[in-house]
Amino acid sequence: MSMRRATISDVAREAGVSPSTASVVFSGKTPVSDATRRRVIDAAAALGYTGPDPRAASLRRGRSGIVGVVFEEHLGTAFLDPVKTLMMDGLADGVASLGAGLLLLRDHEPTGGGASLMSAPLDAAVLIGCSGLLRESLDTVRARGIPVVVIEGDAGDDVPRIDLDNREAQRQAASHVRALGHRAVVVVTLPARAGWDGGWLRDDTEILVDVTRERLAGAMDVFPDAAAYAAGASSIDEGFAAGRAVLADPERRPTAVIAQSDLLAAGVIRAAEEAGLRVPEDLSVTGFDGIVVDGLAPYELTTLVQPATEKGRAAGSAVAAMLEGGDAASIRFTCTFREGNTTAPAAAHVAGGLPRS
Amino acid sequence: MSMRRATISDVAREAGVSPSTASVVFSGKTPVSDATRRRVIDAAAALGYTGPDPRAASLRRGRSGIVGVVFEEHLGTAFLDPVKTLMMDGLADGVASLGAGLLLLRDHEPTGGGASLMSAPLDAAVLIGCSGLLRESLDTVRARGIPVVVIEGDAGDDVPRIDLDNREAQRQAASHVRALGHRAVVVVTLPARAGWDGGWLRDDTEILVDVTRERLAGAMDVFPDAAAYAAGASSIDEGFAAGRAVLADPERRPTAVIAQSDLLAAGVIRAAEEAGLRVPEDLSVTGFDGIVVDGLAPYELTTLVQPATEKGRAAGSAVAAMLEGGDAASIRFTCTFREGNTTAPAAAHVAGGLPRS
DNA sequence: TTGTAGGCGTTATCAA
DNA sequence: TTGATAACGCCTACAA
């Protein structure tokens, strides 16, 4: 029973046609007479042939139909973030139009053995994030001559990027908060760098994560003196911890918190509730992302809606364009400000000074 | 500048050795003298050759180093579930030892064009879930003669499965609840089938999802008369909705809710808070999964901890075993009961009858 | 330790 | 509409 699998030649022979004709029946690239097609199909069925071997096809065509997606974290960590999850969906769509699938890759292969950027049969690669490892991954991919797109990362000039107007968007939310009369404002930011544990940002703290820096700059454009607390990750729990820290001292409580993600904002709201503060009456909170935060109802965050799915789709399209031989331009997406029920005018009596960090 | 990429033959020629020698330098499968190696490496560098073309190598070897993971939903939906996310991590580990990567596949290709089970260069496939489509996917894969493993799904006898002792585990939690004196208990279950919108289960409701059915059976073993409300999905929001429905009528309120997932349990707790009930004093709640529910602190769910990462890793190992030519046995994992602070003895005065659904 | 030879299964090209 | 031919780039017996 150890007979080898049927090949297209076997099918052709069985059907009494040439291999090229049989091939064409499966690829549909050239007209074939109905009678011939029938014979080939039947022969295939008889032999249990289920179609061309993708490996051979990809060698011949020079395409594997696979796009690598490189994460800098554990897959588990990456997918906990709804924004990335949405991006993946968009990306899946984007490359599907190209007839490709997504291969998950970690840029820091733990076991050393796994499929890697070096050895996977990729047509193209999408890099996500902005760590130092990205640099390395980028070099690998480019050495292989594979088209690459970077989402949310600084990759040098000749690599198309998919970006967001982080600073402008955040400035918009901050302006909204300011227009409501808030003066005592604290920013709760995303991590300052990989391995960050949470804590107040000082003037000399180096912020290595682009997104964090840009959004913070946007907030500072409006509130130059605002203190900023960088959370350990983008999650409700970390937001909660940050919120506790920010609201710890009743004397120095802000009347508004600008959070750099919806999850962080949700955590801050929890912390406010714990401290006996009402949102938005006693504390206004803004988020960033515009995702659905599971379990946050009945709050609707005042936030910046980013087109996460679109970003993924755009990356897919960019990759597709490059594979067609074209040049993919970088794209900068715009966030949309959405007012929810977590911001309200500042109560006059609580306006007070805040410490500069 | 449109010169074709260098091949291993080019490198060999440049280095003054034969192609096979050059090949061996890259694969390391055979000893090569240092001098030769040097020459080959240098030649490669000079030509910008970055290693064997994975497409050609995979044809020759008959292995692509790619394992397909088939989901029955949108990727976004799938990854919102922390359990799946953990499984993916385990799976990534499991197949890495095999030198493979994970290719994301949706069993219901929306655009029709994308990489599919039919055409992707897979060495093996892992199917997750238990819908009707699984059947179809399974047939496709097996027709191709590709090793396959099913996680949490009924796949017929000769397909290795990775399973959980759902019924026994749930029975254990139910027993705990019963030992605490609860008699008025409602089960909040996972969806009864794809497309389920949430609602009470009646005796004649057909439950098409294995996990739902098994866990429910476990609860019914202990509380044969318990009513059951099937949520629309495993999320806090759906749990909240279910909780509202379950707690709606003060006259018929249960003293304990057995939820089939931690996310659902978290939602039920929210609903309880909303209804002015204290957990666990007025209402005991149990979950299932043992994940970290972001934002649930300070509650610690009484729950069944399932080895999600292990499940993924086991699937990876099973696949690896099959690729080695061996037979992979099905594995059944066991959950561990963990008591948190969301269950407490039933208060005597609220013991009351519950309607049978 | 190195080289030779043959084929992995397909498909693009061109001619019939 | 069909068929012959020639790669695609690599790897592995096996021989030297």
Image: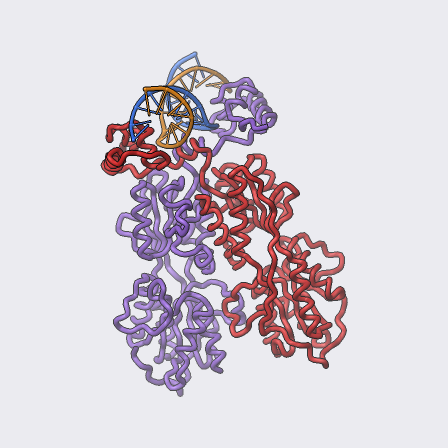
Chain colours: A purple, B red, C blue, D orange
The residue depicted at 50 percent of the width and 29 percent of the height is A28
Q: Quadrant of the N terminus of chain B?
A: top left
The residue depicted at 39 percent of the width and 42 percent of the height is A320
Left or right: A231 with respect to A156? right
User: Up-down: is A3 above or below A204?
Assistant: above
Q: Quadrant of the C terminus of chain B?
A: bottom right
Image quarter for residue A59?
top left
User: Up-down: is B158 above or below B237?
Assistant: above
Question: Residue A221, image x and y in percent?
Answer: 29, 71
* Residue reaching furthest to the bottom: A349
Left or right: B124 with respect to B206? left
**Front residue of B151 and A235:** B151
Question: Residue B339, image x and y in percent?
Answer: 60, 70
Left or right: B288 with respect to B226? left
**Front residue of B217 and B278:** B217
Question: Residue A311, image x and y in percent?
Answer: 40, 54
Res. A348 in view: no
Image quarter for residue A241?
bottom left
User: Up-down: is A255 above or below A39?
Assistant: below
**How many numbered discs sit on the rendered protein?**
0
Res. A186 in view: yes
Left or right: A243 with respect to B326? left
Question: Residue B245, image x and y in percent?
Answer: 66, 69
